[in-house]
Image: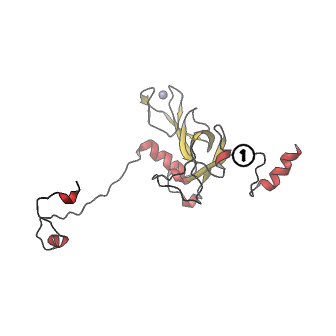
Amino acid sequence: MKLEDYELGGINIKSSDFKKGKVLTTEWEPNLKYAWDNGVAIGRYLAGLKEGRIIARICYQCKRIMLPPRMFCELCFRPTDEWMEVKDTGTINTFSIAQVNWDASRRGKDEPPLLPAVIEIDGASPGMGIMHMLGEVEPDQIKVGMKVRAVWKPREERTGAITDILYFKPLRAPAKKAGARKKTKSKNAAPARGKR
Ligand SMILES: [Zn+2]
C-alpha cells in the first residue's frame, strides 16, 4: 500500500495560512554566542605555536615530558611541574593516506590525498605525539619511523592555532624508488645514485 491510499485525518495547511495568522506560531531570535576556554596548558601550547615554539610539560614524579602539555599527570595523579620547549622535529608514529576530506566528502579527482600522521616530537617522552599533516612527500615514500620537521606559517600569519604549523615534511629527501621518474628534483638525484 502506498501513502496515497491511506485516508489521512486532519486539515491540510498551506504556507499562506502561516502568513495570515491562521496557525499558532512563535518567533524566537536565538542568541548562540559561545566561547571555549583553552585552559592553562593548551592556552600556553597555542601561544607557543604563535611564536614558532612547541611547549611541553614535565611531571617530576614519572619524569615524562608530555605533549600536548597538561596540568595534571594521569599516571601519578598529581599536578605537573614545569614547562619545557621541545623541538619542531619528530618521527612518524603512524600515518594514513586519506581520499576523503575532514567532513567525509570525497576528494576531487585532481586533489592529492590528505596525509594525516601522528608525529612523536623530539624532546618529548616516547609515545608523546601530535596529530598533524604530512607534506612535500609522495604517499608511497612515507614510512613509519621517518624523521620529519615542522613547516611553519610565516610569523605574521600565525594565530595561535595548531594550523600555525602547515605540515611536517621529511627531514631528508626520501630515497626515490628505483625506476621512478619524477619530473621534480629527481633530475640531479638520479644520475648520482646510478654511479654508486
Ligand atoms: Zn607523572
- Quarter of the C terminus within the rendering: top right
- 90 on left or right of 41: right
- 105 on left or right of 189: left
Question: Which image quadrant is residue 121 in?
Answer: top right
**Which residue: 58% across, 58% down?**
111
Query: Residue 155 in the image: x percent, y percent?
Result: 58, 58
Q: Secondary structure at mark 1?
A: loop
**Which residue: 81% across, 51% down?**
189
Front residue of this view, candidates 101 and 93: 101
Residue highlighted by disc 1: 174
Query: Residue 75 in the image: x percent, y percent?
Result: 45, 27
Query: Residue 93 in the image: x percent, y percent?
Result: 59, 37
| Scheme by which the image is coloured | secondary structure
Q: Is mark 1 within 8 Å of ligand 1?
A: no
Front residue of this view, candidates 171 and 74: 171
The answer to whether residue 167 is above or below residue 128 is: below
**Which residue: 60% across, 55% down?**
112
Query: Residue 181 in the image: x percent, y percent?
Result: 76, 53
Question: Which image quadrant is residue 39 in?
Answer: top left
Dot 1, crowdedness within 10 Å: few (<14), some or many (≥20)?
Answer: few
- 117 on left or right of 31: right
- 173 on left or right of 108: right
Type of the residue with mark 1: Pro
Front residue of this view, candidates 22 and 184: 22
Residue lying farthest right? Answer: 195
Front residue of this view, candidates 178 and 56: 178
Count of marks, rendered view? 1
Question: Which image quadrant is residue 31 in?
Answer: bottom left
